[in-house]
Image (cartoon, rainbow, N blue to C red):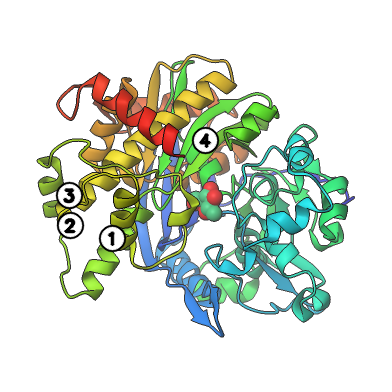
Amino acid sequence: MPPARTTTVSPSASSSRSGARFAAVDLGASSGRVMTGTVGPSSVDLREVHRFPNRPVRLGGTLHWDVLALYRGVLDGLREAGPVASVGVDSWGVDYGLLDADGVLLGNPVHYRDDRTEGMADRLAESLPPQELYATTGLQYLPFNTVYQLTAARDSAQLAAAQQLLLVPDLMSYWLTGVRGTELTNASTTQLIDPRTRDWSRTVAEAAGVRLSLFPPLRLPGDPAGELLPEVLDETGLEGHVPVTAVGSHDTASAVAAVPAVTKGFAYIATGTWSLAGLELTRPVLTEASRQANFTNELGVDGTVRYLRNIMGLWLLQECMRSWESEGRPQELAALLREAGSCAPLRSVVDAGDPAFLPPGRMPQRIDDACRRSGQPVPDGPAEATRCVLDSLALAHRLALEDAQRLADTEIEVVHVVGGGVHNELLCQLTADACGLPVVAGPAEAAALGNVAVQARAHGVIGDDAGLVRRLLYDTLPLRRYEPSADHGSPQAWSRAAAAVRAGS
Ligand SMILES: C[C@H](O)[C@H](O)[C@@H](O)C(=O)CO
C-alpha cells in the first residue's frame, strides 16, 4: 500500500491575510481554461485569462487526448495569469498517462470514449463479481472506469514498461513541478478506491491485476503539490516560489465544492459535457439497490461523498451541432434554443442515461432511431431534436434525483445547477419543471471556483470551512432562481414521461 501523506502550506509573496490571487487550471472534455481567482474574506473575483480547445486525436484506431497541446495551453494561461499565490489543477476523471522509469510519458492518454473497454467489465467479473466490486468501491458501472481501461491494457507493452501512472491533473501537476502524487477525489474515479477507508482497495487491484505501486502517494485537496520548476517559471514569466496546491482535481469534485448551497436539503447537477446529478453525503451508500440504480460514491472535498449518477449531458447537443455542421447546416446555438423553446413539450424523449449515446458521431440519427424504436414521433429538424435532447436531460435529472433521494433516504428541497449548463436557461427551467423543485442556477465556472476556493482555504485567506465558502459564493455570485411551472408540460405530463423512460430503461 502507498506511503502515508504529509500536509503543510505557507502563505507566499502574492498573498496576504486580506486577499490573494490564485490560478485555476480547469481542463474539460471540450475545452481547457486558466482562470484567476482573487479571493478576499468577503469577495471572490474570477476571471478567465486563457481558453483553449481540447481536440482529441484518433491514431491507429485509438482515440487519444492531445496532452501536449493541453499542457501548452496551461503554460500560455499561466503566462497570461501573472503573479499568483498558488496554482491548482483539475480535469475530467478516469483518464491517465503512464511514465517509464525515467519519468517520461510513454504515450498520449487514451480518451474514455475509446471503445477499447468494451467487454472489460465482463472480464473483470470473472475474478470479482459486480456485486462485490460495488460493495467495495461503490462506483457506478461506466465502461471507461480506469479499472476497465487497465484491464483492457493488461497485456500491453506500454503497461509492462510503465513505472508510474498519473491521472490527467496529476500529470499536468507533475510537468509543472516535477512532483508526483495521486489526488484522492480523482483517484476515486478509478474504481480502485474503497470509499469507506478513502484508500486503495487491495482486493479490487489484485482481482484486476493492477499494480498499486503504479500510483504515487495519495494526497488530499489542500495538500502541497510542489512548486513551479525553473523551466516553467521561464516559460511563464512567473518568478520566485510559486506553489502548486492539490485541489479537488476531479473537476466534478471542485464543482460540487463551489455549489452555493446555504440550506440543508440541497441536490446539485454539475452540467457540461456530462450532467452529474446527486447529493453530498457524509458516508457512502453501498447497497445492492444503489448498485442496481447505478449510483456512484465518488469522493469529495472535506471527507465528503459525491453520491451521483452520470447522465450523457450536453454532449448530446454538442454532438448534434457537430453533425449538422459536418452536413453543411451549421446551427447558431442561441437561435436554436429560442426555436426549441417554442416546440411542443415532451413530444419525444430518449433515455439520456443510455450508454448507447457514449460514442461520438451521427447523434441526430441515433436520437431519431431511439425515438422510432420507442414508437415516438421522430424530431423534425434541429429545433425539435434540440427540444427532445433538453426534455430528455431534464427528465434524466429528475429520475436521478428521485433515485438519490430514495436510496440515500433524504429529502431534496432545492436543486443547484452549476457548470456550463447554467447558460442554457431553457434546460434550467425544464429541469425545475421536470423535478417540481426550485432550481438555483450558478456559478457556470463552478469547477474553477471550487479549485480557487480550496487553494484560498489552504493558504489561510478564507476560513477553512466548506459552509463559509458556500455562504460567500451565495452572497457574492449572480445566481438565478427558476420556479417549477407548467409552461413546458403539466406535472402529470412530466410524471408520465418519467414513467415511460423508467419502463424503457
Ligand atoms: C468520464 C467523465 O469525465 C467523468 O465521469 C465525469 O465525472 C467528469 O469528469 C466530468 O467532467
Q: Residue at x 54, y 35 (%)?
A: 308
Q: Is residue 487 above or below residue 106?
A: above
Dot 2: within a 10 Å radius of its alpha carbon, few (fewer than 14), some, or many (20 or more) residues? many
Q: Quadrant of residue 210?
A: bottom right
- Which mark is first along the chain, 1 or 3? 1
Q: Which residue is mark 2?
A: 382
Horizontally, residue 503 falls left or right of residue 115, namely left
Dot 4: within a 10 Å radius of its alpha carbon, few (fewer than 14), some, or many (20 or more) residues? many
- Which mark is first along the chain, 4 or 2? 4
Residue 290: x, y in percent?
63, 30
Which one is closest to the eye, mark 4 or mark 3? 3
Residue 63: x, y in percent?
53, 74
Residue 303: x, y in percent?
68, 31
Q: Residue at x 47, y 16 (%)?
A: 265
**Labelled disc at residue 364:** 1
Q: Are marks 1 and 2 in contact (CB under 8 Å)?
A: yes
Q: Residue at x 40, y 16 (%)?
A: 413
Dot 1: within a 10 Å radius of its alpha carbon, few (fewer than 14), some, or many (20 or more) residues? many
Dot 3: within a 10 Å radius of its alpha carbon, few (fewer than 14), some, or many (20 or more) residues? many
Q: Are marks 2 and 3 in contact (CB under 8 Å)?
A: yes
- Which mark is first along the chain, 4 or 1? 4
- Which mark is first along the chain, 2 or 1? 1
Q: Are marks 1 and 4 in contact (CB under 8 Å)?
A: no
**Labelled disc at residue 257:** 4
Q: What's the amino acid at mark 2?
A: Pro
Q: Residue at x 80, y 74 (%)?
A: 155
Q: What's the amino acid at mark 4?
A: Ala
Which one is closest to the eye, mark 2 or mark 4? 2
Q: Which residue is mark 3?
A: 384
* Residue 18 visible in the shown view: no
